[in-house]
Amino acid sequence: MDSDDEAAAAVAMARVRGTLRKSVSSSSYAQPVPRDAAAAAAARSIDDDTVASASASGTQPHASALHGHHDGGGRRGGALPEFVGEGGGEGIYRVPLRAAMHPGRPPPLEVRPHPLRETQVGSFLRALACEPGRRQLWAGSESGVRVWGLDEVFAAGCGGAGARRGDEESAPFRESVPVPPVLCVEVDAANALVWTGHKDGRISSWRMDLAGDGDDAPLFKEALTWQAHNRTPVLSMVITSYGEIWSGSDGGVIKAWPWDVIAKSLSLTPEEKHIAGLRIERSYIDLRNNATAGNISSFPAADVKHMLADHSRAKIWCLTSMAFAVWDARTRELLKVFGMDGQVESARLETPVMPEQFIEEEIKAKPVKKDKPQSSFTFFQKSRNALMGAAGAVRRVATKGTFVEDNRRTEAVVQAMNGTVWSGCTDGLIILWDGNGNRLQEFQHHCSSVQCMKALGERVWVGYASGIIQVMDVEGNLLAEWTGHSCPVIQMAIGGSYVFTLAHHGGIRGWPLASPGPLDDILRTELSNRELSYRRLVNIRMLVGTWNVGQEKASYESLMSWLGRAFFDVDLVVVGLQEVEMGAGVLAMAAAKESVGLEGSANGQWWIDNIGKTLDEGISFHRVGSRQLAGLLIAAWARKDLKPHVGDVDAAAVPCGFGRAIGNKGGVGLRIRVYDRRICFVNNHFAAHLENVSRRNADFDHIYRTMTFNKPHGSAASATSVQLHKTVNANGNREDEDIPEMAEADMVVFLGDFNYRLYGITYDEARDMVSQRSFDWLRERDQLQAEMRAGKVFQGMREGLIRFPPTYKFQRHLPGLAGYDSGEKKRIPAWCDRILYRDSRDVLTAECSLECPVVAKITSYEACMNVTDSDHKPVRCAFSVDIARVDEFIRRQEYGKILESDKRLRFLLQESHLVPDTIISTNNIILENQEHVVLRITNDCQRTKAAFVILCESQSITKQDGTKSEFPPRASFGLPLWLEVEPSVGLIEPGQTMEVTVHHEDYYTQEVFVNGVLQNCWCEVTRDKEAVLLINVTGSTSTETITHRINVRHCCSTISAPPPINPPSITTPSVDVLSGEASTRSSKKNPSNYLQRSDFKPLGSSEVFTSEFRDHLESEASGTMSARLEHYLYY
């Protein structure tokens, strides 16, 4: 019960404010009426699992079909009668209905079902990429790299008891050796490599063939790795049209890594990989330090979070949160730097001011005046005002400093197949740019933050922080939208017939590229018809307890009396305490902690530790979560065998005291995922005193509507997982802010000191009725049930039949009913301490199924009258909870069987795999005299658009003796530096023709860089060279391709003299220079800066190079490098 001094302080404060509110209890109340099933018929999409429509149907099993931790009789057997409040079928109090298949989205392929957050600590997936040719899906995690074979997703392999926690139902995959956290992934299909950028600054490559050797193969290792950035992470990475790897890091650092050096290092033996890594590390080109655009602006000193290769025009886009930079991929020249509004930026962004500076400004702006000592009430009021002011200052600092950045930032970028560049912002805005960085248009189809985008053919997929996935055409028109996940969609990849999405929790789903369409309806119907094959029913027993401890500490005997039965038949224990500690100083300290993201106290920890000892914590039970707000504390423990199925624990706190700011009244909650179902537990302490019925109702309404769950303070998961707080977007990450989070849960349990009293009765009458155990008569005068009948509070919630005496108010350490308050105030006994719940049923007779996944019954509801440590008695309520869940492993197998056996689906899939017919104007191109040759690609299909990508399959050089020397591909696009193809990516309208310009350069330069600095360069004459171009044509609903091959030959019958060069000096290079690498650039730069060379030794085999590289290292040690300069400058 509330202390007298606290109540006096509250009344005094209310008088000072002049807002003392008086409420009286209702004079008449309606009788309880059974709930109407039709009132709860409307459905709402609220989860990433199964969400139903009212029309969804399914088999409802008898209770004898249940299995799990306990056996039992019929579902209604042993259940207590329940009182049901009115208003549960309306608005935010409607019961969320579920179904075997979500009716509002395409049926997804569950590659990796939602893992529990606690199982992913240190191994969250954060990057995703796909290689359609080899049908592999790659993911980078905080501990390594994973790869799924798309042809094996329907096979058995990973699931079962032997799988790592979180991967029990995942499709089969292979895993790499442990490596530092992966932040970005790029695919090099031409060389069958996957490149990863890591948090420690390393770049690594992985061979696709080694990653596909089967489930029983050992952990695969990286093919090559080097330290790309010192002490800073590789935030972004891209492979250019000419094969270079560019990496971005903190502070605007951008490095380019020449492909020639990487290719030669890849050819070394495993024993020489360390030498190769050191060689690559010294070969980088520092782009940012030498970057200027018209002597006006340079790239800003901000983190390079995103990079995009514009293969259509051979450009590179580098993005910070607020600025864009466009580079020429061939010459490495910075072409333009501009902001989100399209305007050219200044040379540098201002260095962000640290929050401490703003704190000093706040202190200087608001000096503290010294007043004379006041009364205790005035001191408390001033303390409260000071706390509120401090909280406001913290919020202002956070807004201005680094805690919360600008509301509009760039979070994603992609190039559509028509050549436009799309950038997505934190406010949901999408901006379209042309290839030169000119702003074309902007639009917004959703208010949540854009997190990722992917393009194929004439479609663009967009993933939002709200979990929404949208499909648009290349003009930005919205084609479809659905809820893909229950949390942010952070990455996308396209492969096979699916667009794969990675959710923030680590789950991966594949969505048919043809969705939405008739394929979805067939899949949804067939999977729903097979529900019995993948539905699983389990039963758990829960014990929920509440106790207002009145700032006291309980004895071991009292705790055993209250919670001791948990040893026998309980799987989940949830305990809520009130008045763990009170007083002005405690409340002030608690408010200060909350303002900086801290919570808890010594008293609270004492209770958690001692309850844990009572439950034999660490052996029989494991604590899964807790939350404290001033005197309110809630904690949960799960039995050892249930713990693997319990996780995703989120906590919340809502203060209701003193202007909704102080935690003497309010609620603390835990949201726990149990067998893939969300259960919310909320511990409350409402307004005191008989007449404050309306205030208590308002407290419940405020808590129910505003409670927002987040990861508990200091949780292990929150330390490693990416934080995507709702403050990122002022509009919120949720599609509908009017829907409370508790309305989305499958089960909600409210417990605590609700402070509802008995009305219309005197103290003596109440004592007499209690002594006679006339509880039926007393219940008719219970304020809580009267308000529930009227639909004013706890709408639609249930409470077990009360068969125990009122639990308030008692004199401490006086046993029995004689302990009721007999002091001066003689407070009327009341059932202040209550436990209520709501499950998935819209009618009381509903059985557990995927349409009604959580069905609970109360098996006992009692108070521990022998406990005398507080002026309240502890109350406990035992639940038997039936849970219906989906076996994702079995459902995925059924998914595959349907795709294979259903003739309608096979026909639709074959139709979606059709590639538009195209015609090319020639198969052979001969270039000479710097001419431009136009290649024409015609879309011969009259129905759909054709997307094309032009790659270089191979290239060769004709030696002086007439023989040819073949070169390996220069990464995915791999264009040789003497060849320009524009556009190399495009979208062709039905019946239309696209003209592609093919051009060659007679002269280009060789450059040597050491540690990012240009050391030497010369001009090379282009000899007779050949390249084989591939034109890959695809549609919009599949990655199936039709390939055209074109031979391009550059004839150089007469080699003219290269442009005149006036070298500044010709000296013998130092050892540092000779250990650098040569890379080639266009001769468009000023030729006077280059050292002329005309003849080079042709590139030999990898074995010859390896042997010569050893000689190079030996000669470096002996100081004879100058004698070998002529040869090694070529490499």
Image (cartoon, helix red, strand yellow):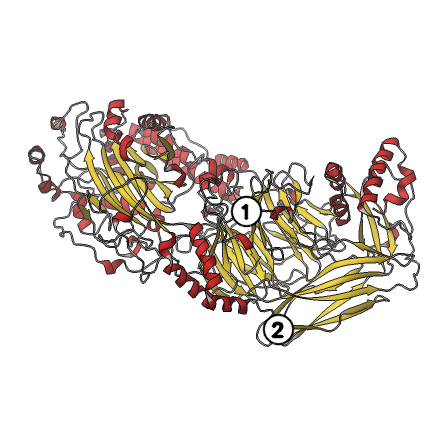
Marks 2 and 1: in contact by CB < 8 Å?
Answer: no
Give the residue at x 14% y 38%.
803
Q: How many marks?
A: 2
Q: Position of residue 601 (x, y in %)?
A: 37, 28
Label 1 packing within 10 angstroms: few (<14), some (14-19), many (20+): many
- Horizontal placement of 51 versus 971: left or right? left
Residue hosting label 1: 173
Q: Earlier along the polypeptide chain: callout 1 or callout 2?
A: 1
Secondary structure of the residue carrying numbered label 2: loop
Q: Does residue 524 lie above or below 550 as drawn?
A: below
Residue 587: mark: none
Q: Amino acid at mark 1?
A: Phe
Q: Position of residue 514 (x, y in %)?
A: 51, 65
Give the residue at x 40% y 52%.
49
Q: Nearer the viewer, residue 912 or 1131?
A: 912
- Horizontal placement of 1107 versus 742: left or right? right
Judge whether residue 417 can be spotted in this image: yes
Q: Amino acid at mark 2?
A: Glu
Gap between marks 1 and 2 measured at Cα: 39 Å
Judge whether residue 832 can be spotted in this image: no
Q: Does residue 456 lie above or below 356 as drawn?
A: below
Secondary structure of the residue carrying numbered label 1: strand
Residue hosting label 2: 989
In this rendering, which labeled residue sits more in front, label 1 or label 2? 1
Residue 988, quarter of picture: bottom right
Q: Nearer the viewer, residue 898 or 413?
A: 898
